[in-house]
Image (tube, rainbow, N blue to C red):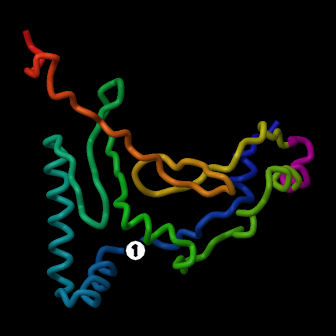
Amino acid sequence: MAKLFQAVSRYGPRVDQGGNVQLRELCDWMSRSSGLNPNSALMALGEVGDGVAFYLRLGSPVILPGLGRLRLTADRYGELRLNFVADKGLLLQVLNKQKFSGTMINAPAGHWTDAQYKEAWDAEFPDDPLELPAPRPRRVRHIGPGRPMNLKGGQTRRKRKPKVVVASGGADGGSGRA
C-alpha cells in the first residue's frame, strides 16, 4: 500500500528550482541595485561568510537583518547542527504567490483533494493502491508571533499574551521575605 506523501511528491505542485545563482551574479545584482562596486560586494560577501563561521564556532548565534538567524545546536549525541530561521520580512516577500515569477510544476494539483491524488496514483500503479489517511482539517499558515485562533467563518486571529500581575508584597506591605 502506497502512502499519500508518495502521491503528493509525484503529482503535487513544486517549484522548478532552475540553476544555482553564482556569487558573481549576485554581486552584479547588488551593484546595480545599490551602486556598490561589484568587486567590493564580492569581497564583502566573502568576509560575511568567514565572519559567520567564526562567531558560530564560538557558539554565538548570528543575526543577518533581512536574511535571518543562524545558530549552532547539538543533538542528544552531541553532534552539531546548523539551524537557520528566516527573517519575517524575507518570508513575507518570498512566500507571496502573487509576486512569484518562477515556474511552478503541477500548479493545479495544489487544489487537489486526497481522492484526486488516489485516483491519479491508482491509475498509474494499479497493483500498489494508495492508502488514504483519516481526514483532518487543513492547516492555517501564518507568519508572526503567537498561534492563530480559529474564529467563525474560517477567520483567524492571534492569541493575546496573558497579562502578568506582579504582587508588590505580602500582607505587611514588605517584600514577603521573613
**The C terminus appears in which quarter of the rendering?**
top left
Residue 4 x %, y % = 75, 45
Q: Residue at x 30, y 74 (%)?
A: 23
Q: Determine the image quadrant of residue 45.
A: bottom left
Residue 105 x %, y % = 67, 70
* Residue indicated by mark 1: 21
Q: Residues within 10 Å of mark 1 (few under 14, many from 20)?
A: few
Residue 77 x %, y % = 34, 24
Q: Which residue type carries mark 1?
A: Val
How many labels sit on residues? Answer: 1
Q: Residue at x 20, y 76 (%)?
A: 42
The residue closer to the viewer here, 161 or 166, is 166
Q: Residue at x 69, y 57 (%)?
A: 153
Q: Residue at x 13, y 42 (%)?
A: 58
Q: Is residue 146 left or right of residue 133?
A: left
Q: Magenta segment: does it hold 44? A: no
Q: Is residue 90 left or right of residue 28?
A: right
Q: Residue furthest top?
A: 178
Q: Which residues are magenta?
A: 120-129
Query: Considering the numbered disc 1 on the image, is that residue within a helix, a strand or a loop?
Result: loop
Q: Determine the image quadrant of residue 93.
A: bottom left
Q: Is residue 46 left or right of residue 115?
A: left
**The N terminus appears in which quarter of the rendering?**
top right
In this view, 126 is above or below 89: above
In this view, 93 is above or below 129: below
Q: Is residue 176 left or right of residue 119?
A: left
Residue 128 x %, y % = 86, 41
In this view, 71 is above or below 68: above
